[in-house]
Image: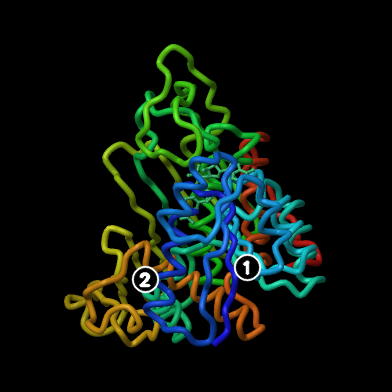
């Protein structure tokens, strides 16, 4: 039985989720072909790192990410830091011969994402980016239906990621409100997940975009609690810090083959606690998905008597081995942490077998290229063509 040493960098929200995911993956899928060993968790905040090590069972806590990059016992460097750190940590890890599992967005610019992709390809590094929503096996059913031609030629895709977790102007300012750290607002933070749906389901090029961004809450109270996302933590009411990112993004796009689409992203969508999904309209049918029915897709086919037509609800079940590893009964359903465990499992198996993981840095770069075109479109208030990808993709 092979062991793979894991070093997680960033012990906030995602750091904890990733740590849990390795454990779930180990238990759900078994010890073959490799067992994850939680060696080191790093956070700039010592107390956060130590607490996470104790909670999640890491052998060691550290405050400098070089501790995992330099450790020969670590095979996978798992990056869960704010976005601006992804590039430095990933490039150092690649240079040190590690494999890299990085949270989305891959980097703060398309150029940095290109460099990361090319460096990994040159070094033979196995990479994976945390686009966990497409790890939900239910989207495999949607992709298979498209592949069988059940909706005809895809003409229109509405993709959305709306939630209300930053509606409250008294929530403390975090790195997500700082453009220098976050790199983008809604298009990079949650639009990247929408674009992952698009590329997973259609695998066509997005040719041009028209994007508008809006900042609804201009400032937030200065943070009182350091380290970790602290969802719901209120800040220091005596001092407010500008929100230099946006809270809402609306994007129109055209894709290869004459299709068009609309992407809407918001973190201030009052009353919508959390919903991500799509409507995909083809010439002979349609597919719908909403996170509010997390384990179902809806399929409409233009067949049979007109008066009997309607959407058919298809529920996920153990026909997919990833689902079967977690639950034996259709309709019981998987949740967010399960998809994260499926993602961690994908990384472990890819490294153990020496094959590519999915979705890799090239996929993350392709998405970052569109994110950047959206940002430019908003600045220039114009349609922007998505530039061709560099050699890395
Ligand atoms: N895939 C998803 O569904 C999903 C969800 C949330 C966040 N994310 C991504 O995960 C990443 C982390 O987001 P989060 O919500 O966990 O953030 P977070 O703020 O909860 O945690 C980040 C942690 O990193 C630490 N940190 C900051 N700089 C560091 C450094 N130089 N070295 C070590 N630690 C450092 C912070 O102290 C903090 O504890 C981001 O890239 C974000 O976009 C992905």
Q: Is residue 27 left or right of residue 258?
A: left
Q: Nearer the viewer, residue 83 or 230?
A: 230
First in residue order: circle 2 vs circle 1: 1
Which quadrant, please, contains the C terminus?
bottom right
Q: Residue furthest front?
A: 59
Q: Position of residue 97 (x, y in %)?
A: 76, 69
> Splitting the image into 4 quarters, where does residue 77 fall?
bottom right
Please name the residue that numbered disc 2 is placed on.
Answer: 286
Per the model, the C-alpha gap separating discs 2 and 1 is 40 Å
Q: Image point 62% across, 78% down: which residue?
A: 351
Which quadrant is home to the N terminus? Answer: bottom right
From the top left corner, tell me how far across and down residue 247 is, in percent: 47, 35
Can the viewer see residue 253 in this picture?
no
Residue 231 point in image, percent of width and height: 38, 39
Above or below: residue 169 compared with residue 231: above
| Residue drawn at x 41%, y 24% as measured from the top left | 235
As drawn, the label of residue 76 is 1
Eyeballing the image, is 81 above or below 8? above
Secondary structure, mark 2, is strand
């Amino acid at each position: 039985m092979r062991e793979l040493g894991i070093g997680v960098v960033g012990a906030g929200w995602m750091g904890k989720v990733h740590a849990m995911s390795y454990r779930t993956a180990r238990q759900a899928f078994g010890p073959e072909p490799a067992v994850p060993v939680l060696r080191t968790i790093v956070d700039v905040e010592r107390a956060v790192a130590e607490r996470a090590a104790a909670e999640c069972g890491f052998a060691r806590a550290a405050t400098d990410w070089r501790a995992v990059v330099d450790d020969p016992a670590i095979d996978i460097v798992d990056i869960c830091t704010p976005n601006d750190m992804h590039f430095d940590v990933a490039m150092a890890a690649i240079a040190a011969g590690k494999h890299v599992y990085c949270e989305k967005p891959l980097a703060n610019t398309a150029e940095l994402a290109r460099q990361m992709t090319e460096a990994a390809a040159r070094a033979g590094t196995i990479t994976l980016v945390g686009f966990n929503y497409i790890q939900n096996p239910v989207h495999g059913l949607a992709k298979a239906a498209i592949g069988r031609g059940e909706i005809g030629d895809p003409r229109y895709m509405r993709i959305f990621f709306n939630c209300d977790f930053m509606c409250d102007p008294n929530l403390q300012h975090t790195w997500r409100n700082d453009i220098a750290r976050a790199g983008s607002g809604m298009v990079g933070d949650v639009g990247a997940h929408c674009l992952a749906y698009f590329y997973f389901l259609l695998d066509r090029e997005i040719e041009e975009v028209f994007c508008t961004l809006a900042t609804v809450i201009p400032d937030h109270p200065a943070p009182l609690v350091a380290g970790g996302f602290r969802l719901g933590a209120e800040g220091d009411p005596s001092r407010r810090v500008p929100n230099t990112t946006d809270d809402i993004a609306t994007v129109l796009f055209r894709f290869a083959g004459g299709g068009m689409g609309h992407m809407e992203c918001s973190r201030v969508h009052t009353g919508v606690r959390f919903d991500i999904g799509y409507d995909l309209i083809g010439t002979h049918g349609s597919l719908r998905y909403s996170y509010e029915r997390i384990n179902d897709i809806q399929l409409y086919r233009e067949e049979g008597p007109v008066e009997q037509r309607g959407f058919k609800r298809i529920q996920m079940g153990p026909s997919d081995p990833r689902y079967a590893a977690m639950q034996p009964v259709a309709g019981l359903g998987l949740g967010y942490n399960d998809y994260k465990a499926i993602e961690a499992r994908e990384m472990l198996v890819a490294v153990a077998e020496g094959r590519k993981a999915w979705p890799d840095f090239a996929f993350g770069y392709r998405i970052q290229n569109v994110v950047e075109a959206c940002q430019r479109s908003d600045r220039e208030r114009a349609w922007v063509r998505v530039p061709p990808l560099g050699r890395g993709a």
